[in-house]
Image: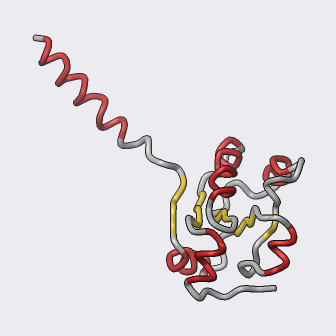
Amino acid sequence: MKHLFLLTTLLLILPAMSFASDPVKHVKADEAAKILADGKTAVIDVRTPDEFKDGHIKGAKNIDIMSKDFEAQVARLDKTKPTLVHCQAGGRSTRALPVFEKLGFTHLIHLDDGFGGWQAAGKPVEK
């Protein structure tokens, strides 16, 4: 009887768990470039302004994760627009993702290897 209860519980819980997936799509540079090609995705670069000036993805908006008003700046963005978030290597942008999620962004994309991966893949850079 105990085994039947456990089996029934698992059969009820497992399908529900499949809906609790990561709300963030994780991509590398090649897939990010394909996504950005349609021009409908916002690009948020969370690096410092100096890093941004040295080179960035075309059309990116720089919102430094270290700025005191980072969350307030992010809150002013369109939460329904697909949004690609990145930093230099993926660490700072990974730390930024919970802020975007908390603010209700519905379509987040993370550039896992960051701007460094974008450059290494030979993708276009704007200065």
Q: Nearer the viewer, residue 21 or 111?
A: 111
- Residue 81's place in the image compared with 16, above or below, is below
Q: Residue at x 74, y 66 (%)?
A: 45
Q: Residue at x 71, y 46 (%)?
A: 99
Quarter of image, res 121: bottom right
Q: Is residue 126 left or right of residue 117?
A: right
Quarter of image, res 85: bottom right
Q: Is residue 28 left or right of residue 62?
A: left
Location of the N terminus (image quadrant): top left
- Tag count in the figure? 0
Q: Residue at x 62, y 54 (%)?
A: 94
- Residue 123's place in the image compared with 56, above or below, is below
Q: Is residue 62 left or right of residue 80?
A: right
Q: Nearer the viewer, residue 15 or 68?
A: 68
Location of the C terminus (image quadrant): bottom right
Where's residue 36, x and y in %?
Answer: 61, 77
Where's residue 65, x and y in %?
Answer: 79, 54
Residue at the extreme left of the image, as rendered: 1
Q: How is the image coloured?
A: secondary structure
Residue at the extreme top of the image, as rendered: 1
- Residue 25's place in the image compared with 18, above or below, is below
Q: Is residue 57 left or right of residue 53?
A: left
Where's residue 79, x and y in %?
Answer: 70, 54
Where's residue 3, x and y in %?
Answer: 12, 17
